[in-house]
Every structure is written in structure tokens, then in C-alpha cells.
Image (tube, grey):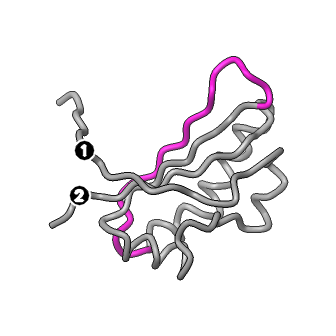
């Protein structure tokens, strides 16, 4: 078995829109993403003390085949449904991919 793949994507969101962005993702996207074979986890990060703030979406997948099932034949291309676009002041056109080298959690 290979290490999981983390797909990292960045955008900029007005601080006042962060809660609605997360709620919209949960309400309209998360069930779809969970159904993709090989999906493991999603984490959203927001820079502190900036407005608008840079946000990072980290999705973890079993392998690149799982990423392709999610993102299509061009897995680095940003996946931004039309209903999510209004939240973004700016959005990166592509994601990057990372191997998990170490992950420790408290028990």
C-alpha cells in the first residue's frame, strides 16, 4: 500500500463569508466527496488576522486514482462548482499534491 495523497488548493475568502462557505460545502459538496471511492478526509484552514483571508483546502485520498475519480482527467485543475464561486475573491486555478510523510495524533 502506498502513502495517502493530499491535494492542496488555495483561495481567498472574505472573513465575513467563511462560515457560509463552510456551511455551503457541508450542505452541497461533502456528501458527493464522501461517495468518491478513496476519499479519506477534508480539512479547511484559514489564515488568522487577515481579511480577506487566504484559505487552504486539504483533501486526503488513498492514491492518485482516487483523486482522478474526484477531479477528473486533469486532477490538478481546481474543482469549483458554480454555487461555490461567489465565495472566492480569488482562487488558484490548480491544486498541488503532497505525500504524507508523518502524521501523529493524540490518543
Magenta run includes residue 49: yes
For label 2, count other residues whose C-alpha is less than 10 Å away and answer few (under 14), some (14-19) or many (20+).
few
Rounded to the nearest whole Å, what is the CA distance between mark 2 and mark 1? 8 Å
| Residue at the spot of label 2 | 3
Magenta run includes residue 96: no
Relative to 25, is 39 above or below?
Answer: below
For label 1, count other residues whose C-alpha is less than 10 Å away and answer few (under 14), some (14-19) or many (20+).
few
Residue 2, percent from left and from top: 20, 64
Residue 57, percent from left and from top: 55, 48
Residue 104, percent from left and from top: 22, 34
Left or right of 12? Residue 86 is right
Q: Quick one: SS at disc 1?
A: loop
**Residue at position x 54%, y 61% in the image:** 30
The boundaries of the magenta stretch are 36-52
Relative to 30, is 9 above or below?
Answer: above
**Residue at position x 32%, y 68% in the image:** 63
Decide which of 47, 94 is in the foreground and name it.
94
> Mark 2 or 1 closer to N-term?
2
Left or right of 85? Residue 97 is left
Q: Quadrant of the C terminus?
A: top left
CB-based contact (under 8 Å), mark 2 and mark 1: yes
Q: Quick one: SS at disc 2?
A: loop
| Quarter of the rendering containing residue 83 | bottom right
Query: Hey, which residue is sitting farthest top in the picture?
Result: 49
| Residue at the spot of label 1 | 101
Amino acid at each position: 500500500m502506498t502513502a495517502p495523497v493530499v491535494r492542496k488548493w488555495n483561495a481567498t475568502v472574505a472573513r465575513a463569508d467563511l462560515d457560509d462557505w463552510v456551511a455551503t460545502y457541508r450542505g452541497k459538496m461533502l456528501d458527493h466527496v464522501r461517495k468518491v471511492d478513496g476519499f479519506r478526509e477534508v480539512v479547511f484552514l484559514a489564515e488568522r488576522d487577515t481579511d480577506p483571508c487566504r484559505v487552504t483546502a486539504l483533501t486526503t485520498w488513498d492514491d492518485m486514482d482516487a483523486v482522478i475519480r474526484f477531479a477528473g482527467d486533469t486532477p490538478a485543475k481546481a474543482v469549483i462548482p458554480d454555487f461555490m464561486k461567489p465565495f472566492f475573491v480569488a482562487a488558484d486555478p490548480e491544486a498541488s499534491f503532497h505525500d504524507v510523510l508523518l502524521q501523529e495524533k493524540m490518543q
